[in-house]
Image (cartoon, rainbow, N blue to C red):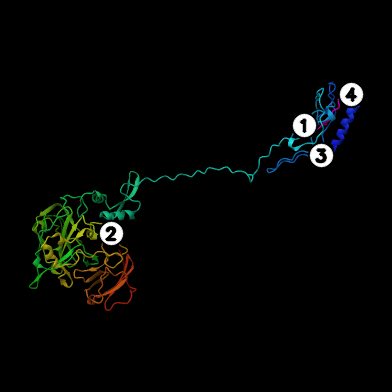
């Protein structure tokens, strides 16, 4: 706003009034009060102090100050009301009075304020904005751009810490299965202990506790009831050595699996298969009996003996056990070779006769002989497949029974090692049939089966002939044949042609997956579309 046009007029009126009321000697004349109010202020004469006479009030003409916005300061008024004009002061100066905001709606008649008797007359001046009071700012409706934001604490809910796993357990079933394979059992179980859940190795707690107790355990995965002795030696021949025509070492391929035991073929004398006399090779306790009917139509026995807590031996395809065994054996054959545990084991001294047999099917095939040491843990391409005490789980503790003999019996048995071509391979592997990771050799399983029954097996027999069974095949290729190859060295594909046995085309799809096809005639040049798939 510009300065009011009334200021010069007001100043002229003031000086004229002073001149009129002053005597020639300079003393004030009769006390006359001249007062005019500007925006509520009054001009008075300080000479005498009679009862004041109020003059009419007139408010100055001015424009109201605008309401300040949040980002602006309030505008400073350009007119200033005055009061206390002292005629004795120099030049009749006026003292400014602070502006009151907002302007009053109605101002009552002012009361004259007597001026001091003596004092300088203030010099009229214009309003200085610096002398004006600072208006109270209006609260902003938004945060100014230069304002420092106040940090707001964000409360994040804490995630409760899960309880620790129970001792000996794992977070996943896969970890528990891997541990089970290490300790010599199979499967897993989920249990909650003291409010904490975990996956434990082995299908039952008793087996796991037995295997991890640090103490010895037997072939059934149980704590020892017999004396511990993993170094038992066999002293009596399992049968009369001169009545044996062929020994196939443990670990051959048969029925789609790698057998944990070997085979003994009885000799044939005068066209008749000898009925082998079978003896206890060491002091032993008969622990279990299986009596079952075979696919050949014969009823046969499977007998399991313990020579100590850790050392066990088994014979199968037995036609006639001795009377002491028959007295406690089942009388009705089962449909499988699952065994019956004896509540009171029967003791036999080394060399005692325990049974007679001409072999499976009463002379159609050999009878079985195998030995096991629970302190021995054999390794396989997929260890968890074998970590149990049933079916192929026996393979994990398989040892060569003939290596439990001292000389000269050990060499006498080894001289009868052989295969489809006959004996005469004393250096044949025993046990054989080990998996070779990334190669064909070993046992393979149906992909939809979480069992240990196997599905396809390939290995070298005692005479180094390649033998493969399963998937409807039973192919044997003698060493020296044009299609012979050691399955432990084949890492891609190969076709084995066994002539009268047919052919088998095998291809590794990856390190743990095998494709198998078979037929008769000549080998195909590539994997036939009609093939089966097996896994480790």
- Viewer-proximal residue among 179 and 449: 179
Q: Earlier in the sequence, mark 4 or mark 1?
A: 4
Q: Earlier in the sequence, mark 2 or mark 4?
A: 4
Decide: few, some or many residues near mark 1? Use Cα within 10 Å; few <14, some 14-19, many ≥20.
few
Direction bottom: furthest residue: 521
Which stretch is magenta? 32-38
Query: Which corner quadrant holds the N terminus?
Result: top right
In the rendered image, which residue does mark 3 sit on? 3
Task: Indicate the position of residue 395 as horizontal and vertical percent values.
Answer: 22, 60
Mark 4 → mark 1, Cα distance in angstroms: 29 Å
Task: Indicate the position of residue 227 as horizontal and vertical percent values.
Answer: 15, 50
Mark 3 → mark 2, Cα distance in angstroms: 105 Å
Q: Earlier in the sequence, mark 3 or mark 4?
A: 3
Q: Residue at x 48, y 45 (%)?
A: 156
2 vs 1, front mark: 1
In the rendered image, which residue does mark 2 sit on? 383
Mark 3 → mark 4, Cα distance in angstroms: 34 Å
Mark 2 → mark 1, Cα distance in angstroms: 104 Å
Q: Earlier in the sequence, mark 1 or mark 3?
A: 3
2 vs 4, front mark: 4
4 vs 1, front mark: 4
Mark 1 and mark 3 in contact? Answer it, CB < 8 Å. no
Q: Is residue 201 covered in magenta?
A: no
Can see residue 91?
yes
- Name which quarter of the figure residue 49 lies in: top right
Element under disc 4: loop
């Amino acid at each position: 706003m510009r300065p009011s046009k009334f200021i010069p007029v007001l100043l002229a009126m003031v000086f004229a009034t002073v001149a009129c009321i002053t005597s020639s000697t300079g003393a004030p004349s009769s006390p006359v009060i001249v007062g005019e109010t500007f925006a509520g202020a009054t001009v008075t004469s300080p000479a005498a102090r009679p009862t004041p006479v109020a003059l009419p009030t007139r408010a100055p003409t001015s424009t109201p100050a605008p309401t300040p916005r949040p980002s602006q300061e309030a505008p400073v008024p350009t007119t200033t009301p005055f009061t206390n004009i002292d005629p004795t002061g120099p030049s009749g100066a006026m003292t400014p009075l602070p502006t009151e905001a907002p302007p009053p709606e109605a101002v009552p008649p002012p009361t004259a304020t007597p001026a001091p008797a003596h004092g300088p007359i203030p010099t009229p001046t214009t309003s200085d904005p610096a002398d004006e009071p600072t208006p109270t700012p209006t609260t902003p409706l938004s945060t100014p751009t230069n304002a420092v934001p106040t940090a707001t604490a964000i409360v994040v809910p804490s995630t409760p810490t899960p309880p620790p796993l129970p001792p000996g357990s794992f977070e996943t079933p896969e970890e528990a299965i891997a541990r089970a394979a290490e300790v010599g059992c199979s499967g897993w179980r989920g249990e909650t202990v003291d409010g904490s859940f975990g996956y434990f190795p082995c299908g039952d707690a008793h087996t796991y506790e037995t295997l991890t107790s640090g103490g010895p355990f037997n072939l059934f995965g149980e704590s020892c009831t017999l004396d511990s002795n993993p170094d038992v030696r066999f002293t009596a021949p399992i049968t009369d050595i001169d009545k044996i025509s062929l020994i196939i070492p443990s670990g051959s391929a048969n029925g789609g699996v790698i057998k944990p035991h070997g085979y003994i073929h009885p000799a044939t004398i005068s066209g008749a298969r000898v009925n082998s006399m079978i003896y206890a090779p060491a002091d032993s306790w008969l622990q279990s009996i299986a009596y079952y009917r075979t696919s050949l139509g014969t009823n046969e026995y499977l007998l399991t003996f313990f020579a100590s807590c850790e050392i066990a031996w088994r014979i199968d395809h037995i036609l006639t056990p001795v009377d002491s065994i028959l007295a406690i054996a089942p009388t009705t054959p089962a449909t499988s070779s699952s065994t019956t545990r004896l509540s009171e084991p029967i003791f036999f001294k080394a060399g005692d006769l325990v049974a007679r047999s001409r072999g499976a099917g009463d002379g159609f095939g050999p009878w079985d002989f195998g030995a096991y040491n629970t302190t021995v843990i054999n390794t396989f391409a997929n260890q968890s497949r074998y970590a149990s005490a049933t079916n192929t789980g026996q393979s994990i503790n398989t040892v060569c029974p003939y290596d439990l003999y001292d000389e000269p019996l050990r060499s006498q048995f080894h001289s009868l090692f052989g295969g489809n071509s006959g004996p005469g391979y004393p250096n044949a592997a025993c046990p054989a049939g080990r998996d070779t990771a990334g190669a064909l050799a070993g046992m393979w399983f149906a992909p939809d089966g979480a069992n240990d029954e196997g599905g396809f097996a390939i290995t070298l027999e005692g005479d180094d002939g390649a033998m493969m069974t399963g998937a409807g095949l039973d192919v044997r290729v003698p060493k020296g044949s044009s299609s012979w190859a050691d399955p432990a060295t084949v890492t891609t594909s190969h076709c084995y042609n066994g002539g009268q046995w047919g052919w088998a085309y095998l291809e590794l799809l990856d390190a743990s997956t095998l494709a198998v096809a078979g037929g008769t005639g000549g080998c195909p040049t590539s994997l036939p579309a009609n093939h089966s798939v097996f896994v480790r």
